[in-house]
Image (cartoon, coloured by chain):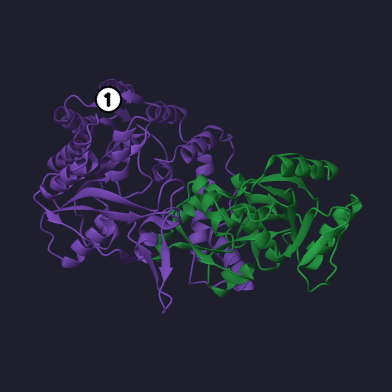
Amino acid sequence: MTNAAMRRAQLEALVEAQGGCRATPPLLLPADPYFDLAGEEFGRRLLLTTDSTGAEHCLRPEFTLPITRDYIADGTRQPAAFTYLGPIFRQRDTGPAEFDQAGIELLAQPDGDVALDQVFTFARAALSIYGLPANIRLGGVGLFEALLVQADMPAAWRPRIRHRFGHPEAMERLLSRLEAAPDAQRQEQPSRDVLIEDVTARMVSTGLSLSEGRKPEEIADRYLEQQALDVAHVPAETLKLLRDYLAISGDVLSALRQIEALAEKHKLMLGAPIRAIRRHLDKLGEARITFDAAFSPRLDYYTGIVFEMTGRSGEVLASGGQYDRLLERLGATAPIAASGCALWVDRLEAEVSA
Amino acid sequence: MSGITLAVPSKGRLEELTRQWFAERGLSISRPGGARSYLGVMDGEPDVTVRFFPASEIARELIRGNIDIGVTGRDLIHETSENGPSSVHFARSLEFGHADVVIAVPDAWIDVTHLHDLADVASDFRSRHKRWLRIATKYITITRQHFAKAGIAEYRIVESLGATEAAPASGVADIVVDITSTGSTLAANGLRVLEDGVMLKSEANLIVSRTADWPAEKKAHLDDLLQRLGATAT
């Protein structure tokens, strides 16, 4: 057996040994759920094909979605663990479009912390099969949401800021815009009724449906909200807090200390999410861990803690975290806790031969 | 072999202007087989093979390296492939065929004047309307790239191969990404370009393929030709 084949066999064994169900979703999947969940940005990575009825399918681009959809359709709501190892297909700038991914999904587990620990253990065990040290980058979605809820600002700005978390350029543009906001005097605004009438007239005259898409009331309300926001400044101190917070990045212990100092200075209660991160550090032992306050996947179903494990040149070898909002987004009628991670098998092997 | 393949638009105003542009620089292109032939010659340049192609095929073949140089719109290079711009060298603008690829929303959307407004509307569109914000366009690659940069992910593209400006009124889409030179067609259809909604400024360009084979002798021939056309070498 070659060394590569040995490592592959060990990875197979690790995937089998998680005490869960080995999931093997079909290679050909309906494409719409992916567009629905992740939009065009992920959609452009799909390998698409169309059947004779015109329905779009894609080659399996990852495992989490089919696994969680099957779980919801099953309707049990019982704690469940799934593992997987097999080919996925994505359009990539470099490397073949077909490559292997392995991973774990822990659903409806009674204790989210314990579940995340199991995910960390799984990912680290996989890296050690390849003889790789764990360089772990942590992000705090729960921490940022806790900070945002308490930071002093007009409420309407919070979803706008939350929405840009994990996209540094978009966040930078928004913060700069808020900092540069002129001290505009509030101008006399037309009444809501007048606005609705005006918008309705414009829609009718250009043949737009008044019920299919955005309705006149929605447009008028958002217009008024926008005018109000233009004068409802986010306090300069809050903007400074956000910038200081998002810039925190480095060794996890000193990063958390900086956050605690920031919380104390601004009188924010961030104890619970910080403790949640600390609890996992004990389990992660001697791994090299950094915390990056601005780090988050761009998808809004992530919650709690997210992570990446990277290789020598910074390539992501494993990524995952907690995503308690995912199953609801996929149609579950009540919140269901979820955590897991995916491993990039070809990159793991490439790290060994590098 | 130092022969160079030059592709020029095969019909319409674009063909006319392109041939005129070359003629003004002393390099007349003729079409010995008449308008139905797709092979042409350049006067005094026996080593240049001229091919007449539809503009979008010129973009595709330049990116693949099947033709060496060509005249087509910058927008088509960006749209044909994400790797398009890095696969070619824009040697010079021909100063015609000006048009912008723009984002336009219904004029009735008085609350949406900038991209950041669109980001806000897109982010909660699904929870309000039980579907994604829909964008009609034929510029799928350019739209995806631009929206990704702007941090807007919550939308679906509806591919539109013609009369994109009619999509909002016919209920096919909410907004459009379209090409326009004066904006008058958009305005006539009750659409307004966002204040920061110009995604790409396009015009006809003389374009060199980076993926074609360029042995030294052929490269020297190219540089000579580019110089005579007042274009920058690769």
Residue A141 visible in the displayed image: no
- The quarter of the picture where residue A328 lies is bottom left
Left/right of residue A295 with respect to residue B100 in the rendered view: left
Residue at the location (81% across, 63% down)? B40
* Mark 1: secondary structure: helix
Colour displayed for chain A in the image of the structure: purple
Q: Which residue is mark 1?
A: A252
Residue beneath the point at 21% across and 64% down: A70
Q: Position of residue A233 (x, y in %)?
A: 49, 36
Picture coordinates of residue B231, whole percent (x, y): 79, 42
Which chain does the numbered disc 1 sit on?
A: A
Colour given to chain B in the rendered image: green
Q: Vertically, is B26 above or below A265?
A: below
Assign the C terminus of chain A to one quadrant of the image: top left
Residue B198, image x and y in percent? 65, 50
Q: Position of residue B205 (x, y in %)?
A: 74, 51
Q: Residues within 10 Å of mark 1 (few under 14, many from 20)?
A: many
Q: Amino acid at mark 1?
A: Val
Seen from the viewer's position, the closer of residues A81 and B125 is: A81
Q: Is residue B210 above or below residue A45?
A: above
Residue placed most toward the observer, B63 or A68: B63
Q: Quadrant of residue A151?
A: top left
